[in-house]
Image (tube, grey):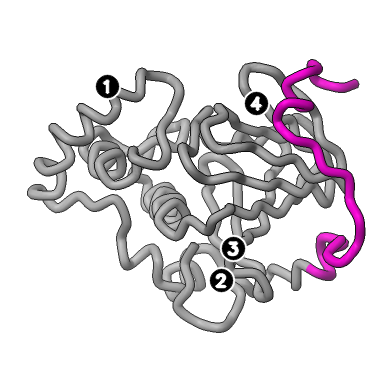
Amino acid sequence: MAARSDERVSVSNPVTGVSLSELPDDESAAEIRLAPGAQGPAEHVHRTTEERFEVREGSVTFRIDGRERRIDPGTEIRVSPGTPHTFRNEGSEEAVMVVRTVPPNALLGEVVVTLFGLAHDGKVDGRGRPGFLRAMAMAEAAVDETYFTGAPYALQRALGETFGPLARALGYRATEERYLDDGFWRARAGGGDDSTDSTNSTGSTRGTEIPVVDEREAGGSKTSE
C-alpha cells in the first residue's frame, strides 16, 4: 500500500467498490472495506504467500479452491500458498475485514494501489482491469508470486516475459509513484479524512481469541445460509 507519511490514508477503487487502508500498528496488514455488491480481485493464486482474512463487520463470501463459504464477523480464514481464491460482498451493507500477508508482500500492495489509481483516472475497464500493455508490465513484475486462474500459469508467464519489456519500453510500469504518493489519495479520494481509526470503526479483536478457519475447512462446505 501507499506509505509516504505517518498519517493513515485510505485508497479506493470507484469501479469495484473496494477500499484499503493500512493499519498503523501492523505493517503487514490492511483494512479492506467492501461496498454492497463489491467484488474483490478475480480468482488468483499466491505461490508463496499466505493470506489471513479476519472479518469484522458484515459478511464476506469467499471462493477458495472452487468452493464457497460465507464468513461472518469474529472469524479468521487462512488461505495457504498455492490456493485459488477470491471474495465478494453479497450483502446489503458494507463489509469490513483485515488481511495480513505472511510473509509481507510489498510489491503486491503497490500493484493493487496502482490499479486503484488507474481506476480513478479512468484507465481501467468496467471490471477494473487495465489495458493490455499495462497488464503485461504487471504480469512481468508479479507473475513469479501472483497469477490469475483464468488462463494457464505458463501462458501468463510467457506473455509477461514477451510483452513486458515492450510495455516498459513504451512507458508502462507495474507500479506508479504518483499513485503510491499519499498526496494523490488526499486530492482524489478524500485522503483519510472520512476514515476513523480501525480499532474503533471495526471493533478490533486484536488481543482476543477468534475462531480460525483454514482453506481446507472452507472448501469442505458450500456457502452457508
Report the magenta residues as a range: 199-225
Q: What residue would you read off at disc 1?
A: 155
Nearer-N-terminus badge (4/2): 4
Residue 150, position as x, y percentages in the image: 43, 20
Q: Is residue 213 magenta-colored?
A: yes
Q: At x 44% / y 51%, what residue is drawn?
A: 108
Nearer-N-terminus badge (1/2): 1
Query: Label 4 sits on what residue type?
Result: Ile
Query: Label 3 sits on what residue type?
Result: Ser
Nearer-N-terminus badge (3/2): 3
- Residue 58 lies in quadrant: top right
Q: What residue would you read off at disc 3?
A: 28
Name the side, left or right, on which 114 lies relative to 6.
left
Nearer-N-terminus badge (3/1): 3
Q: What residue would you read off at disc 2?
A: 191
Q: What residue would you read off at disc 4?
A: 64
Is there a contact, CB below 8 Å, between mark 4 and mark 2? no
Query: Label 2 sits on what residue type?
Result: Gly
Which dot marks residue 196? none
- State the SS at label 2: loop
Label 1 or label 2, whichever lies nearer to me, is 1
Residue 152, position as x, y percentages in the image: 35, 18
